[in-house]
Image (tube, grey):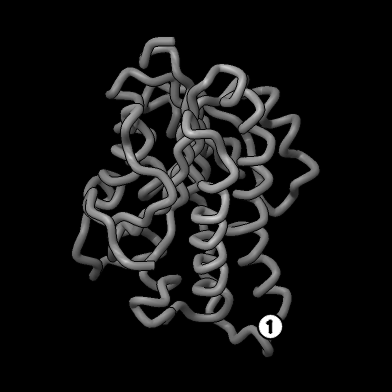
Amino acid sequence: MTGKCRAALVTGGNRGIGLAICQGLHEAGLDVVLASRDEAAGRQAASEIGCRSIVLDLEHPNGFADALDAAGPIDILVNNAGVLLRDGMLEAPQDFETSLQVMFKAPFELIRQTVPHMKTVGYGRIVNVSSDWGSFAAGLHGPGGYGVAKAALNALTLALSRELPSCIKINAMCPGWVRTRMGGDAASRSPEQGADTAIWLAQLPKDGPTGGYFRDRKAIEW
C-alpha cells in the first residue's frame, strides 16, 4: 500500500486545528475524510480542501458504525474533536459526562472500530489530540471535565500502545495554545502550528515511536 492510497479520518475537521490537520494530510497526498457533526459546515470545509466529508456526532455513538461505513476503510485515525465546558464536575455532572463522551469514550470506540482493518493491512496510525490541561506534569489545569477527559485520553494512548501490534502506532500530542474558537484570539499559535505534530504523527515511518506524548515533534512528560 502506498502513502497516496491511505485514508485518514479526522474528527472535528471542519475548523481550527482539525481543519489544518485535514489540509496538511491532503497536501501530503492522503485520502482525507473530514468528519464533522455539522453536515453543511463539514461539506463546505471539505470542498475548499478537496477532500471527502462525513457526518459524525461524537455524542451519539449509535451512529458511529454507519459513519465509518460511509468513510470506508481507515488507515489513519486522528481523534481531534473536543469540547470545553467550564462548569465544575460536581455542579454540572452532565457536562462532565459530555466531556468524557467526546474526548475519551468516542475516541476509544472509533479506535475499536477502525483497528480491525489496520490489523488486516498491517498498517495503522492513531493520533489523539490532547492538551497541557490534561497533563499531570503541567498541573492538570483544565476546567470542569476537560482536563480529566484529556488525562484519560492520554492514559488510553499509553495503555493501548501495549495491546496493539507494532504495525499500528498510537500517540498523543499537545498542540499548545492555538488561535481557534476554543483557544481564543489571544493564543500565541496558529492552527497550522498546532496541527504540525499531529500531521507528523499521522505519517510516522515503520520505526517511528508509539505510546508517546508529543509537542512540536518532541516527546514531553505526561
Residue 32, image x, y percentages: 45, 25
Q: Kindly identify the residue that appears in the image at 35 percent across and 27 percent down.
A: 206
Q: Residues within 10 Å of mark 1 (few under 14, many from 20)?
A: some
Q: Nearer the viewer, residue 34 or 185?
A: 34
Q: Is 178 on the left or on the right of 172, as rendered?
A: left
Q: Is 3 left or right of 113, judged from the image as shown?
A: left
Quarter occupied by the N terminus: top left
Q: Which residue is mark 1?
A: 92
Is residue 180 depicted above or below 148 in this figure? above
Residue drawn at 75 percent across, 30 percent down:
66
Q: Secondary structure at mark 1?
A: loop
Q: Is residue 13 visible?
A: no
The vertical placement of 212 against 118, above or below, is below
Q: Is residue 176 visible?
A: yes
- x, y percent for residue 106: 65, 51
Q: Residue at x 48, y 24 (%)?
A: 123
